[in-house]
Amino acid sequence: MNWKNGACGHKFIASFSGGKDSVLALYKAMQVGEAVGLIIMLEEEGKRSRSHGMPPEIIRAQAESVGLPVYTGAASWTDYESVFTGLLKQAKNKGAEALVTGDLDMPAHGCWHDKVTKNAGLKLGMPLWEMDHLEAVQEFINLGFVTMLVTVNLSLGMKEEDLGRVLTHEFVEELQARGIDPCGEGGEFHTTVIDGPIFKHPITVRKCEIVRDGDYAFLPLELDRMA
């Protein structure tokens, strides 16, 4: 099983949420392979990303700044796999040889991405697989990436005041002191990356009014077209 190096020497498509893990995985894969596009999965209505609830315009702005085309699919959880596999096949027809994802803790057996890539005839690359969570976050920050918290789970130690904060080494230390995984791998939080070494220019955003839904609080973002 060669998931950590699956993109090495290959053209690849990257599963992209716009958050820190998918961006760090993309960065690492770009050091050893050639990115040919990003897969972005949206909710059924096509108004928000399936993973982080971001409007498509934000993720498209990220993709444009990175300089990669976007493969977009809107799906419910029922047809998610078929839509995702269809996008993989489209990317393969355009020259992709591997799929890159930002998973850290994927089990060695029963991996969903392993199944769908095999069905599409692609290799699988997970550059962050089995990486220490703190090490991953520290590397991300040290590389110069800038990411903002946009979703928090209030039942897992997160606070509404955490929304909009940028992930820094000091904030990571604070999260750990609060007993929170610095990667948010337990679903504690999600982020949106707005700048970094693979971005040609920062993504300028405007923070909207916080939305609450049960245990979750969300910070919607809009592109700041006046910046």
Image (cartoon, helix red, strand yellow):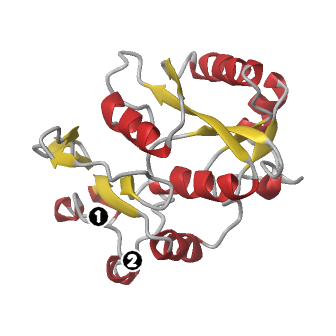
Q: Tell me if residue 222 can be seen.
A: yes
Taking depth in this image into account, of 68 and 18 the one nearest to the observer is 68
Q: Are marks 2 and 1 in contact (CB under 8 Å)?
A: no
Q: Is residue 203 left or right of residue 14?
A: left
Residue at (63% x, 73% y) in the render: 132
Q: To which residue does mark 1 refer?
A: 158
Q: Determine the CA span between mark 2 and mark 1.
A: 13 Å
Figure check: 168 above or below 160? below
Q: Nearer the viewer, mark 2 or mark 1?
A: 2
Q: To which residue does mark 2 refer?
A: 172
Residue at (71% x, 44% y) in the render: 34
Crowding near pointer 2: few (<14 within 10 Å), some, many (20+)? many
Tell which circle, 2 or 1, labels the residue nearer the N-terminal end: 1
Figure check: 227 above or below 60? below
Numbered label attached to residue 131: none
Figure check: 158 above or below 224? below
Q: Amino acid at mark 1?
A: Met
Q: Amino acid at mark 2?
A: Val
Give the quarter of the image for residue 68. Answer: top right
Q: Is residue 227 left or right of residue 30?
A: left
Residue at (62% x, 40% y) in the render: 14
